[in-house]
Image (cartoon, rainbow, N blue to C red):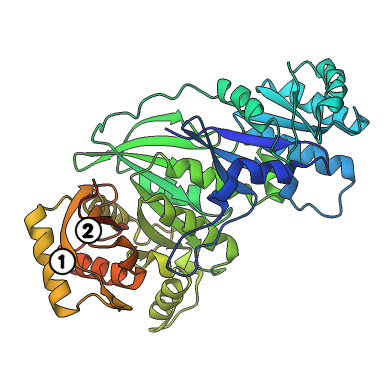
Amino acid sequence: MSKPVVAIVGRPNVGKSTIFNRMVGERMAIVEDKPGVTRDRLYGQGEWLNRTFHVIDTGGIDIVDEPLQDQMRMQAEIAIEEADIIIFIVNGRDGITSSDQDVASILQRSKKPVVIGVNKVDNPDMQEHIYDFYQFGFGQPFPISGSHGIGIGDMLDEVFANFPVNEEDEEDDGVIDIAVIGRPNVGKSTLVNSVLGEERVITSNIAGTTRDAIDSYFEQDGQEYRIIDTAGMRKRGKVYENTEKYSVLRAMRALERADVVLVVVDGEEGIIEQDKKIAGYAHESGRAVIIVVNKWDAVEKDDRTMKEYTDKVRETFAYLSYAPIQFVSAKTNQRVQKLLPIVNEVVDSHKMRMPTHVINDVIMDAVARNPAPTSGTKRLRINYATQVATGPPTFVVFVNDPELFHFSYRRYLENQLREAFTFVGTPIRILARKKNES
C-alpha cells in the first residue's frame, strides 16, 4: 500500500525547511556503496508511531521570475494535488499576515486535512500568540519550534490521526504489477498504450491509488498484468509543467505497488540529472528493474550506436548493473513486444528462493577462491549463509564480526550469487549477522 504523503506548506521564511529536516531526520542520508544514487532534497521520508510517510518540503521549490504571491499559490496548489495531509506552517512571532490568509484560503478549498503548526514559539510565554490562528478553521494550532524540536511530537500525533487507514498488504493474487516511471515527456503513456495494444485482452481500466496514476489490467498468454502509468494527470496537472521535480514523488508512490519497474529514458534527448534521481529511487525500492530506452527510432545510428549507448547507461546507472536494457520505439512499436518476456524473467528472479545447502556451497566455494580480507590482526570468518526473504532475494551471512564484512567483499559475494543463480533484473541484499545473533 502507498505511504501517506504529508506536504509542508506556508509562506516563505516561516521555517518549513527546518521542520522538514526535523521530520525526516537521518533518512536524508543515503547509505549506498555504489556511485550515482542521488536524491532530490525536496523529498524525504519520515516515521512516526511506526508508520512511514513521504514528506514534501514546498519551500524547496525553485520557481523564478514569478511574483511572490504566484510562487506561494503554485507551491500550495502542487502540495494539495499530491498530499494526503497538509501541515500549514505559520510564524507565531509575526501573527497572521495577508500571505498566511492567501495560503489558508487555498487550503480551505482543498478539502484535505490540514494541521497548523505555529512555528518559532520557543518558550511558554509566547503560546498566547497561537490563538489567533483558530480563525482559519483548521482546528487546534500546535505551538512548535523547528529549531529546538519543541512541540513537533504533538503536531505529528495530529498528523498521524489523519493518515489514511493502514490496510494490510493484499495477498499475492498472481497479477504482475508493472510501474512505468520516468521524467515527463519521455514517452511513458505512449509506451503503456503500445504494451496494451489491440492484440491483447484488456480486462479493465480503473483509477489507481496514486492520484495521477492509471491502472490498466490486461492478460497475455494466461498471465495477468497490471500496468501503472504515472504519466496520467488530472485537470489541475498543468502546474506540473513548471515543476518537473514532482515526477519523483509520483514515481515513488508507483514503486510501492510494483513488482517490476520500467525506468523509461529518452533515447533521442539522452540521460539528464532527473533520470538519475528517478532511477536511483527504483534501485532503492528493492523492486525488479528494466531500463527502457524509448524513441530509438528517432536516433541517428550506425552499427556502434547501441553498444555506445549501452555503455553510457551502464556508466550513468552503475547501481543498476543488474537491470536489463531494452531499446524500443513506443511510437512505432519497435521491440515493445519483447518487454513482457523480460518482465516475466526479472519477476521470476525477484521471487526466487534457493535451498540453504546450495547457497552455502556457493558462498563457501567463493570464500575458498577469494578468502575474506583481514583488518589489522582480525580476519572475517564466514560460518554459513541462508536466504531469509524474496522480493528482492535477501541473504543473511553469519560471521564472527559483522564490522569486518567490508562492502567490497559483500559485492564480491553478490557477484558470485548472481553468477551461480542467474539473478536477472533484481537487486540482491546481503546482511551480516554475528553467529549467535538472530
Residue at (19% x, 63% y) in the render: 422
Q: Is residue 121 above or below residue 35?
A: above
Amino acid carrying mark 2 in the image: Val
Picture layout, residue 264 above or below residue 80:
below
Three-letter amino acid code at the position of disc 1: Ile
User: Between 28 and 63, which is closer to the camera in this rendering?
Assistant: 28
Q: Is residue 316 left or right of residue 11?
A: left
Q: Which mark's residue is nearer the viewer, 1 or 2?
A: 2
Task: Say whether residue 273 is left or right of residue 58.
Answer: left
Q: Which residue is mark 1?
A: 363
Residue in the foreground of this view, choosing between 369 and 9: 369
Pick the front one: 263 or 169? 169
The Cα atoms of the two marked residues, 1 and 2, are separated by 9 Å
In percent of width and height, residue 183 lies at: 56, 54
Q: Position of residue 144 (x, y in %)?
A: 74, 31
Q: Residue at x 44, y 62 (%)?
A: 32
